[in-house]
Image (cartoon, grey):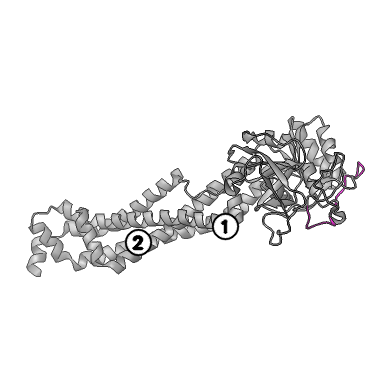
Amino acid sequence: MISLAIAYLKDRPLTSALNVALLAISVALLVLLLQFGHQAGERLERDARGIDLVVGAKGSPLQLILSAVFHIDRPTGNIPLDSLDLLRRDPAVERAVPIALGDNFAGYRIVGTDDSFMALYGAELASGSTFDEPMEAVLGSEVARATGAGPGQAFVSSHGLADEQDAEQGHGHAPFETVGVLVPTGTVVDRLVLTPYESVWDVHGIAHGRPESEHAHDHESAAGDAGAPDQPGRRSALTMTSRAPEAELTALLVTYRNAAGALRIPALVNRQTAMQAAVPASETARLLDLLGASLEGVRVLGWLLAVTGGLAIFVALLNMVRSREGDLALLRVMGASRMQVFATVLLEGVVTAVLGAALGWFAAHCLIAAARANFATLGNLGLAAWHPLPEELLLVAAVLGLGALAALIPALRIYRVDAARILARS
């Protein structure tokens, strides 16, 4: 019966191909939505886990979260170095992780920080050791894989961030030394280069308390530009403390010690300082809500396409049954049962749905792979091309059911036909 159903489909190749293509487009669209919604939400939640608050320069809270937590946007500016001690002294703060941004290595963002950053994400060394002195660097697993760098190798950073078009100015005067590589964590750490935050100041010739690296150069204009080289004029200050004239940070990732911190710390930062406090959970939910409204509209379009494909199969099979009533009646005379003829027609709809679902599923994952390779933001989100979801199995089953349903009425029509009357008439 399957061979006979496939032979009938081959007999009208254009109609069959169009029906398969229509279903494939709808399946691809729905798989893309499932993958993007699931992976993006999961990755954002995983990257922000353990971070209760982000403190940075005034500006957009969402931009602050995107730049300081997910590392896919530009920083809002710099904050004073003494804000780190201010928060670490607060009894409601369990951990305050400093980060200083400004450069990249082969498109991967260099994050100046300290040992608390690795502890925040539970990162462990795969080889080498952790950084101890300025200009030492530890590579995330994805960075090491993509660049081929390892312990003992030196590299030169480029001015600016990974997503900037003019990020081509190299810092050849201040090479980094790779001292370690991290095991994969499944978080944003895999795509980062970690180094002491003093390294960022040294690269830009900014004086600080620790002995300046021998690689540092005289770069007067870069003073205070470590966190946001593209916004040199934007320098916020902590009004309740004196402003550090040179060395600054880009943001602080804060974890509360108790619930009282969630009530007091954001208000303290927003009302009594020139900095802002942003809650990752709130900003991430707002971002997903904004994306969700658009994704829902596209999802409706995808199901409309799937229903249209089912209707096309129904019309094609109904016309086929009408035009081939004689052939199908002849099958009955030759010994085929009513159920066998019924199943043959039903299989045509199912085979068409199987081909459309398989082609659409494969095309969707190929598109994800191509998009990841060509769009840095999708790569930074960690979008995986071949990561099937259980929901995709349900989607394919729904499309197969749609194909069977579309073929049901034509199959019932031929099931009820009187073979003797059809043959006598023809």
- Around disc 1, counting alpha carbons within 10 Å, would you say few (fewer than 14), some (14 to 19), or many (20 or more)? few
Q: Is residue 244 magenta?
A: no
Q: Is residue 240 magenta?
A: yes
Dot 2: what SS?
helix
The amino acid sitting under disc 2 is: Val
Q: Is residue 249 visible?
A: no
* For residue 104, above or below residue 134: below
The percent coordinates of residue 310 (x first, y second) are 35, 60
Q: Nearer the viewer, residue 108 or 298?
A: 108
Specify the farthest residue to the right: 242
Q: Main secondary structure of the magenta part?
A: loop
Q: Using residue 275 as the reference point, say whether residue 324 is left or right of it.
A: left
Tell me the quadrant of the picture where the C terminus can be found. bottom left
Residue occupying image coordinates x 16% and y 65%: 325
Q: Nearer the viewer, residue 16 or 110?
A: 110
The percent coordinates of residue 304 (x first, y second) are 44, 60
Q: Which mark is residue 294?
A: 1
Dot 1: what SS?
helix
Residue 213, located in which quarter of the rendered image? top right
Residue topped by disc 2: 20
Q: CA distance from mark 1 to mark 2?
A: 27 Å
Precedes in sequence: disc 1 or disc 2: 2
The magenta region covers 228-242
The percent coordinates of residue 101 (x first, y second) are 75, 48
Residue 45, located in which quarter of the rendered image? top right
The amino acid sitting under disc 1 is: Ser
